[in-house]
Image (cartoon, rainbow, N blue to C red):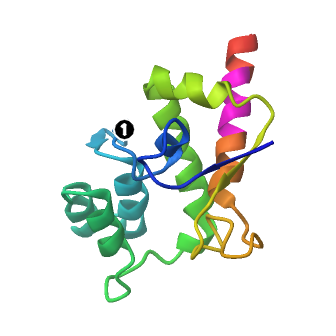
């Protein structure tokens, strides 16, 4: 079986979305969602980090982060997967209830059913990379490994 998620309103797996309202503390700051953190990291050492962090919704944070009029960090394509890994791991380390949901998925594949996203999601026809789903599987393995020790 494969577990699909997308909307934050689809229990229980909607909580896997970066838009889900589960804050994290990273880099000495509180981020309202993992989406806020991820988008802000595109602008390290600029005032845009705080603008994204203070965005009222994850959608607004994403809109700022996707604005190509803003100065995207030069190494973004190289570091973006690691930034996402770090944020997602912290989310599941921070929120025990979410961690239990993730661990209860066992060995199942996890797929972000994002029809218009061929990198983080599966895309319209399932040919996307599903990097967010892959990262969730990696995070699940890390958390399971910690439990087994």
When the figure is inspected, residue 22 is found, relative to residue 126, above or below; the finding is above
SS at mark 1 in the image: loop
Please report the residue visible at 68 percent of the width from the left and 18 percent of the height from the top. Answer: 146
Please report the residue visible at 56 percent of the width from the left and 63 percent of the height from the top. Answer: 80
Quadrant showing the C terminus: top right
Please report the residue visible at 38 percent of the width from the left and 53 percent of the height from the top. Answer: 37
When the figure is inspected, residue 18 is found, relative to residue 64, above or below; the finding is above
Residue range in magenta is 138-144
When the figure is inspected, residue 112 is found, relative to residue 71, above or below; the finding is above
In the rendering, at what x and y percent does residue 59 appear?
32, 64
In the rendering, at what x and y percent does residue 128 appear?
72, 71
Tag 1 residue: 22
Query: For residue 82, what is the image quadrant?
Result: bottom right
In the rendering, at what x and y percent does residue 145 appear?
74, 21
Quadrant showing the N terminus: top right
Query: For residue 89, what is the image quadrant?
Result: top right
Magenta part, dominant SS: helix
In the rendering, at what x and y percent does residue 118 appear?
65, 74
Q: Residue furthest bottom?
A: 69
On screen, residue 98 versus residue 4, left or right, reads left
* Nearer the observer, 93 or 11: 11
On screen, residue 31 versus residue 118, left or right, reads left
When the figure is inspected, residue 131 is found, relative to residue 110, above or below; the finding is below
Is-magenta flag for residue 70? Answer: no
* Nearer the observer, 138 or 78: 138
Callout 1: few (<14), some (14-19), or many (20+) C-alpha neighbours within 10 Å? some
Q: Residue furthest top?
A: 149
On screen, residue 147 versus residue 76, left or right, reads right
On screen, residue 63 versus residue 118, left or right, reads left
């Amino acid at each position: 079986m494969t577990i699909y998620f997308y909307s934050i309103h689809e229990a229980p797996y909607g909580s896997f979305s970066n838009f889900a309202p589960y804050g994290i503390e990273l880099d000495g700051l509180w981020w309202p969602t993992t989406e806020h953190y991820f988008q802000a990291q595109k602008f390290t050492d600029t005032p845009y980090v705080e603008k994204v962090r203070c965005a009222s919704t994850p959608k607004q944070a994403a809109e700022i982060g996707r604005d190509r009029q803003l100065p995207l960090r030069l190494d973004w394509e190289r570091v973006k997967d690691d930034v996402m890994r770090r944020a997602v791991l912290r989310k599941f380390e921070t929120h025990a209830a979410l961690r239990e949901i993730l661990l209860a998925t066992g060995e199942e594949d996890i797929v972000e059913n994002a029809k218009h996203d061929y990198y983080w999601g599966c895309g319209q026809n399932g040919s996307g990379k599903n990097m967010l789903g892959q990262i969730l599987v990696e995070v699940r393995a890390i958390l399971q490994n910690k439990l087994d020790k």
